[in-house]
Image (tube, coloured by chain):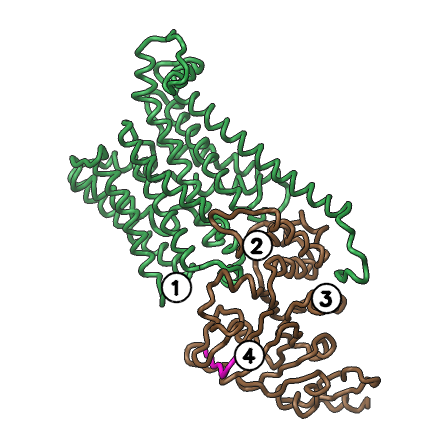
Amino acid sequence: MATIFVSQVCFGYDGQPVLAGISLDIHAGERIAILGPNGVGKTTLLKLLSGTLSPSRGSIFLDGRELHTVPRQELARKIAVVPQDLTIPFAFTAREIIELGRTPYLGLLRGFRVDDRRAVEQAMQLTDTIDLGGRIINELSGGERQRVIIAMALAQEPEILLLDEPTHLLDITRQAEILDLVTELNRDGGLTVVAAIHDLNLAGRYFNRLIILHRGAVLAEGTPEAVLRADIVEEAYGGPVEIIQTGNGRVPIVLPVSRLRDRVKEQ
Amino acid sequence: MPVSTQKPVPTSGSMSKHTQTAAVSSTLRFRVGLGLLVVLVGVSVVLASGIGAVHVPSEEIVCMLLNRTGFVHLPQTWPHSDETIIFQIRLPRVLAAALVGAALSVAGVLFQGLFRNPLADPYVIGTSGGAAFGASLAAVLFSHFSILGFGAIPTLAFLGALGTMVLVFRISRVGGRTPVVTLLLVGFAVSIILGYSVSFLLIVNERFELNTRLIYAWLLGGIWIEHWSQLGLIALIVAVGTAGAFMLPRSLNGLALGEECAEYLGIAVERQKAAVIVVGSLLTAAAVSAGGLIGFVGLIVPHFLRLLFGPNHVRLLPLAALGGAAFLVITDLLARIVMPPNEVPVGILTALVGGPAFLLLLRRTKREYRF
C-alpha cells in the first residue's frame, strides 16, 4: 500500500512563494481533508502530490522513491486525480470518459482487454454510473458528471485518490452523495483519499484527519475535534467564527460570525 | 444514490446489459461505417478512373486491376489503349486524390484534437502559408527545376510547409513546453506574414509576366500528380504519417480533457504534443505538395464523421483517413467533369460540395453540435 512522505517542500509561482516548507505523512488508508483559505495553496499541494508540479525545494517520496523519478505511467496507476474544473470540448459519452481511466495500462502493443473492461465495469458499479454510460458527458448534471469523473479515476485502479474541491458547485444532497461515495471507497475499498475542500463542516463530517494550511505551512492537523477549534480556524481564515457543539461526541459545526450588528443581536 | 450498501447495486443484471448493448451498438455502427467507407473508396476510385474524355466501363477497370494482382487471369476484352489510359493517366491521379484527401483529413483530426478547437484545420499552424510561400518562390525563381520527378513548386511547397512547422514550433516553445494557445497564435501570425509575402511575390511576378496563372491555380488546389514515381513518394510519406497518427489516438483522447488531466492519466504530454505536430505537419506538407492548398477537407470531413460516430479518436482516425480519401476522389472527379474540357480547381468544389452537405447534416442532427 502506497504512502506519501512530504519533506520540507517549498513551491512558488514566478517567484511568489506559495508553500514554504510543508512536511506531511500520508499513510495508506487515510481519509485526509486539506483546508485553508482561498489561495493558500491547497490545489498546489495536490498538484505536487500528483507529480504534475515539482517542489522547488524539499522532496516528496512515494513508497520511498522520489516522486519525480517515478515514470508518469507508473504514477498514474498509483495516484489518480479528480480535478476541480474539467472542461471537455468533445461530445464523449460517459463510458468513453471512464474508459480513459485505463490509459496508463494501455500502450502501442497493448490494447483494451478483458481486464480493462472489468475495471471500467467495476468503477461504474461503485459510482453508480452504469445508467449514465451512453449519455454525453457534458449533458449530465453536476453530480452525475462528478461521479463519472470519479469513476474515470477509479478505473485507473489507484491506491491513492486526490480530489480537488469534489463538492464544488454541487447542491447539498449531491455534496453528501459524492462524499458518501468517497468515504465508502476509503472505508470499504481501502483507497487512500486526500481532498482539498473549503467547506469546514463537510470536512469535519466526512474526513478523519484534517490539515489546515496557513501562510504556506501546516497550521494544525489532527482529528476534526482537535482541529475545528475557534482559535485555530480564526487564525487560519483571519476572521471571527462561532463553534457550535453538537453534543454526543459529534463533530462541532463552524459558522462565520457576521460583522453586522443587527444580525448578531439574534443571539 | 451512489452508496452501494444503501441501495444494492444491480448484480450485473439488466442495467449492466443495457449499457453493454449501447456500447455494442456503437461498436457495430463503427464497424459498419468503416466497412461502408472502404467500399465507398473502392467504388469511387473505380468510377473516377473510368470517367473522362474516353469512357472506360467500371467492370473493365475491375478486371484490369484483378489481372494486375497476378492471382487471376481474366481474358482481355478491352482495347489496349484503355489500359494505358487507366494505368498511365487516370489511376495515378485518382489515387493521388485519395492520398491527399486522407492526409488532409487525418491532419485535421490531429490538429482539432491537439487544440481542442473545432476551427482548427491542417493549415492552422501556418503550414499553408509556408507551402504557398515556397510554391510562389518556386514559380518566380526556379520554374525549371525538378527533383525526384517533382517540379520546383511541389518541392518548395513541401519544404516551405515543414520549415514553417519547425519555425512555429521553435518560436512557441517556452522552457521545454509548448503551450497550445501560443502555438496557435504564432502559427496564425507566421501564416499572415507568409500569406502577404505570397501576395507580394505575386505582384512582383505579374510585373515580369511569369507564372501567375500557375500559382493562382496552385493556391486554389488541384491534384498535380501525373506519374507513378511521384505518387510513390507521396504514398510513402502519407503512409508513414498515417501510421504515426494511428499511434496517437489514446493520447489525443487524453489531451481532450486538458493537458493537466492527460498527465494524470499517465500521458507524456509534451512528447505526445510534439508527435502530433510533427505527424500532422508531415501529412499536410505531403498533401500540399501533391494538391496545392485544398481547403475545407481537413475541417469538414472530421466534423462530418464526429457527428456520425462520436469524438473517440481510436475510431475517428481510421474513419477520417477513408472518408477524406473518398471525399477528395469524388470532388476531384467533379473538378474534371463539370466544365469540360477545362478543369475547375478542386478547392472550389470541396467548398461548394462539402459545405452544403455539412450544413445539411448539421441541421438534421437537430441538436446543438457538441464537437
Residue at mark 4: A39
> Where are the magenta residues, as a range?
A6-12
Q: Is residue A69 magenta?
A: no
Q: Share a chain, discs 4 and 2?
A: yes
Q: Residues within 10 Å of mark 4 (few under 14, many from 20)?
A: few
Sequence order check, earlier mark of 4 and 2 = 4
Q: Tell me the residue at 68%/77% (across/down).
A: A199
Q: Tell me the residue at 22%/45% (across/down).
A: B201
Instruction: Check contact, mark 2 vs mark 3: CB within 8 A.
Output: no
Q: Tell me the residue at 47%/32% (across/down).
A: B353
Q: Tell me the residue at 49%/69% (across/down).
A: A51
Q: Is residue A8 magenta?
A: yes
Left/right of residue B9 with respect to residue B54 in the rendered view? right
Q: Look at label 4 and name its amino acid.
A: Gly
Instruction: Check contact, mark 2 vs mark 1: CB within 8 A.
Output: no
The image shows residue A220, relative to residue B294, as above or below, that is below
Q: Chain of mark 2?
A: A
Q: Look at label 2 and name its amino acid.
A: Arg
Q: Share a chain, discs 2 and 1?
A: no
Residue at mark 2: A102
Instruction: Check contact, mark 4 vs mark 1: CB within 8 A.
Output: no
Residue found at the far right of this picture: A248
The image shows residue B364, relative to residue B275, as above or below, that is above
How far is mark 4 from mark 2, CA to CA? 32 Å
How far is mark 4 from mark 1, CA to CA? 25 Å
How far is mark 2 from mark 1, CA to CA? 25 Å
Left/right of residue A56 with respect to residue B134 in the rendered view? right
Mark 4 element type: loop
Residue at mark 3: A188
